[in-house]
């Protein structure tokens, strides 16, 4: 089967006669087929629903990661202590 013009895996342009995609490495064994689509690229198509997209991207009850906030406070405090110790030592 000859290489397609565009990679069905990543959407990159494939040079004529190429054995695999120069961007992602897909080839006939790993992903080229007539039924392949550009899934997960989030490109709008005929079925694109803008309201659904906005709802999924910006819904207010979306869970935000909170587990490492304290870590960055500790890092900032450590940097501040190290800076003050270094500054006071060489006064």
Image: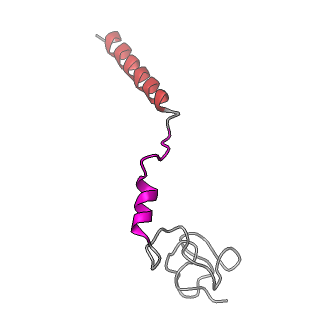
In the rendered view, would you say 84 is above or below 62? above
Q: In which quarter of the image is residue 20?
A: bottom right
- Judge whether residue 54 is colored magenta: yes
In the rendered view, would you say 8 is above or below 79? below
- Judge whether residue 70 is colored magenta: no
Q: In which quarter of the image is residue 76?
A: top left
Residues 53 and 25: in front is 53
Residue 66 x/y as whole percent: 49, 35
Q: Relative to 28, is 6 on the left or the right?
A: left
Residue 85 x/y as whole percent: 38, 13
Residues 70 and 9: in front is 70
Q: Quadrant of residue 24?
A: bottom right
In the rendered view, would you say 47 is above or below 17? above
- Colouring chosen for the image of the structure: secondary structure
State how many labels appear: 0
In the rendered view, would you say 25 is above or below 36? above
Tell me which segment is drawn in magenta.
49-65
Q: Residue furthest right?
A: 29
Residues 91 and 44: in front is 44
Residue 63 x/y as whole percent: 50, 44
State the quadrant of the N terminus.
bottom right
State the quadrant of the C terminus.
top left
Residue drawn at (45%, 30%) of the image = 72
Residue 61 x/y as whole percent: 46, 46
Residue drawn at (65%, 75%) of the image = 31
Q: Residue furthest left?
A: 91
Q: Relative to 87, is 3 on the left or the right?
A: right
Residue drawn at (51%, 75%) of the image = 11
């Amino acid at each position: 089967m000859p290489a397609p013009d565009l990679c069905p895996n990543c959407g990159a342009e494939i040079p004529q006669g190429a054995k695999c995609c120069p961007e992602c490495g897909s080839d006939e064994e790993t992903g080229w087929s007539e039924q392949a689509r550009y899934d997960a690229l989030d490109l709008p198509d005929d079925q694109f629903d803008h309201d659904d997209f906005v709802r999924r991207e910006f819904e207010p009850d979306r869970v935000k990661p909170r587990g490492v906030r304290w870590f960055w406070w500790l890092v900032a405090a450590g940097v501040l202590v190290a800076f003050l110790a270094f500054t006071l030592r060489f006064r």
